[in-house]
């Protein structure tokens, strides 16, 4: 006696599922690739539904006839479904004109073989017109639609089709639906491309922001550390080990602070604003000057007004501009005297960094990341920035409007480069 039927085990079902999913993925990829070759990008289920609907309508049109053994009827049915069957099974796409002609010829053969009322065969022409309009330009689609409407009209006048006017209107509606679907898909693709472009621009903006943060932090810390190391080297030449140790300790402190600042900047950018360490603001500009003084720069700090009331974004921007300016002094004019002035008024906040220009210094601005970075930060603050020689001094001046003036000037900045 045969044993009891064995139900499929979980292992067999699991083993079958990946194979089925693989076949489905390949089918989807092939259908969408075929659509792309036609110049359209529809999801796989739209052409699949259209193909299966055409096959079902063709089968229904044949089965509703009494004389199923008629060669004309069978040939017409096979001809009507041939384009869809070849595409779904073999992946070969017929040209739009050839496909429309095959479907129209098959539908006419079915209608002529044996009239029926109501007749499913004309709906093959309606679906063909809609597919042609959805996969080609408007002019070819209109030509195909007019030819199909003319053919249905001729068959109706010959007495082989009842209600021909209704089917002619159906073809017109099919063309209209296909055109609407094509334009809707084009609009969707354009919106998708716009979003991708916006995402790419956001990534580039974040990269630029990170590059500015790294440049400001690393540039300033290296400049100050080099001054400390130079002092240590001179002290070593003079065999003053105490000064050597002190200078190296200060250089180490600057490097550690720079690393902490850099980690905070990168963490804030990576997390979209919430870093592991608060970023510096305008109240810490004084500490920048102290670091510069400890490194041997002859620079002093002057503060006026209520600096603590500044917003975090404004404070960070001013801090970075001051940081870059002090780094430039340490790099280009370490022996000059300078001053950093920060004044907060009712209508604007002004940051001014000035230093003596060496006698051998020219007036040409050297291309680099420093000044463009400061200009970019000023633009973000809606500020006005001027940077260049003024008499015997090099002056960087930033004016940040506050209150109502800030809103009206947001996003605008000017930079003057004398010489």
Image (cartoon, helix red, strand yellow):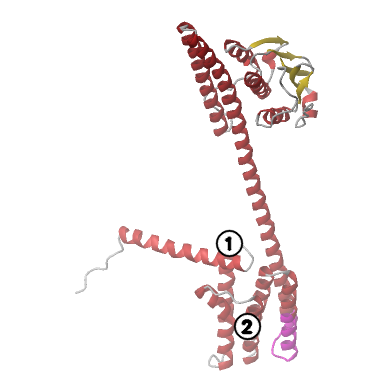
- 42 over 308 or under it: above or below: below
Identify the residue at image location x=32%, y=61%.
Answer: 12
Q: Position of residue 152 (x, y in %)?
A: 72, 84
Nearer to me, 79 or 372: 372
Quadrant of the rendering where the N terminus is positioned: bottom left
- 182 over 248 or under it: above or below: below
Residue 118 visible, this orientation: no
- 116 over 383 or under it: above or below: below
Q: On the image, numbered disc 1 is attached to which residue?
A: 43
The answer to whether residue 176 is magenta is no
Disc 1 crowd rating (10 Å Cα; few below 14, some 14-19, many 20+) is some
Of the two numbered discs 1 and 2 on the same chain, state the one appearing first in sequence.
Answer: 1
Question: 274 left or right of 282?
Answer: left
Total marks placed: 2
Q: Quadrant of residue 367?
A: top right
Disc 2 crowd rating (10 Å Cα; few below 14, some 14-19, many 20+) is many
Residue 201 visible, this orientation: yes
Nearer to me, 276 or 111: 276
Q: Give the range drawn in magenta.
A: 147-165
Nearer to me, 276 or 150: 276
Residue 167 has which mark?
none
Q: Position of residue 185 (x, y in %)?
A: 66, 60
Q: Is the magenta stretch mostly helix, strand or loop?
A: helix
């Amino acid at each position: 006696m045969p044993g009891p039927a064995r139900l499929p085990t979980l292992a067999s079902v699991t083993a079958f599922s990946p194979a089925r999913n693989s076949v489905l993925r390949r089918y989807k990829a092939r259908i969408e690739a075929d659509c792309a070759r036609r110049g359209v990008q529809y999801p796989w289920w739209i052409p699949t539904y259209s193909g299966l609907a055409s096959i079902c309508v063709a089968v229904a049109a044949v089965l509703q006839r009494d004389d199923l053994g008629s060669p004309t009827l069978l040939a017409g049915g096979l001809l009507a479904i041939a384009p869809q069957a070849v595409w779904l099974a073999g992946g070969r796409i017929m040209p739009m004109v050839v496909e429309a002609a095959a479907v129209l010829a098959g539908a006419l053969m079915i209608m002529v073989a044996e009239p029926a009322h109501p007749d499913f065969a004309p709906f093959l022409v309606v679906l063909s017109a809609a597919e042609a309009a959805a996969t080609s330009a408007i002019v070819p689609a209109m030509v195909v639609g007019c030819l199909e409407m003319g053919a249905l009209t001729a068959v109706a006048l010959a007495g082989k089709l009842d209600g021909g006017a209704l089917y002619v209107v159906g073809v017109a509606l099919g063309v209209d639906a296909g055109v609407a679907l094509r334009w809707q898909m084009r609009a969707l693709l354009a919106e998708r491309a716009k979003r991708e472009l916006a995402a790419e621009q956001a990534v580039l903006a974040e990269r630029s922001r990170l590059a500015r943060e790294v440049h400001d932090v690393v540039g300033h810390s290296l400049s100050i550390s080099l001054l400390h190391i130079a002092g240590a080297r001179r002290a070593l030449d003079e065999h003053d080990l105490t000064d050597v140790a002190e200078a190296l300790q200060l250089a180490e402190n600057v490097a550690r602070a720079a690393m902490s600042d850099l980690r905070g900047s990168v963490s804030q950018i990576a997390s979209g604003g919430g870093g592991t360490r608060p970023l510096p603001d305008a109240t810490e500009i004084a500490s920048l000057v102290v670091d510069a003084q400890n490194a041997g720069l002859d620079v002093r700090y002057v503060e006026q007004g209520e600096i603590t009331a500044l917003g975090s974004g404004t404070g960070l921007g001013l801090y970075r501009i001051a940081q870059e300016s002090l780094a430039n002094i340490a790099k280009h004019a370490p022996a000059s005297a300078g001053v950093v002035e920060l004044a907060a008024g009712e209508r604007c906040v002004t940051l001014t960094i000035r230093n003596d220009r060496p006698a051998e210094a020219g007036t040409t601005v050297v291309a680099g990341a420093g000044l463009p970075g400061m200009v970019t930060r000023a633009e973000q603050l809606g500020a006005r920035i001027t940077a260049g020689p003024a008499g015997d001094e090099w002056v960087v001046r930033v004016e940040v409007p506050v209150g109502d003036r800030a809103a009206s000037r947001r996003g605008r900045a000017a930079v003057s480069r004398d010489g």
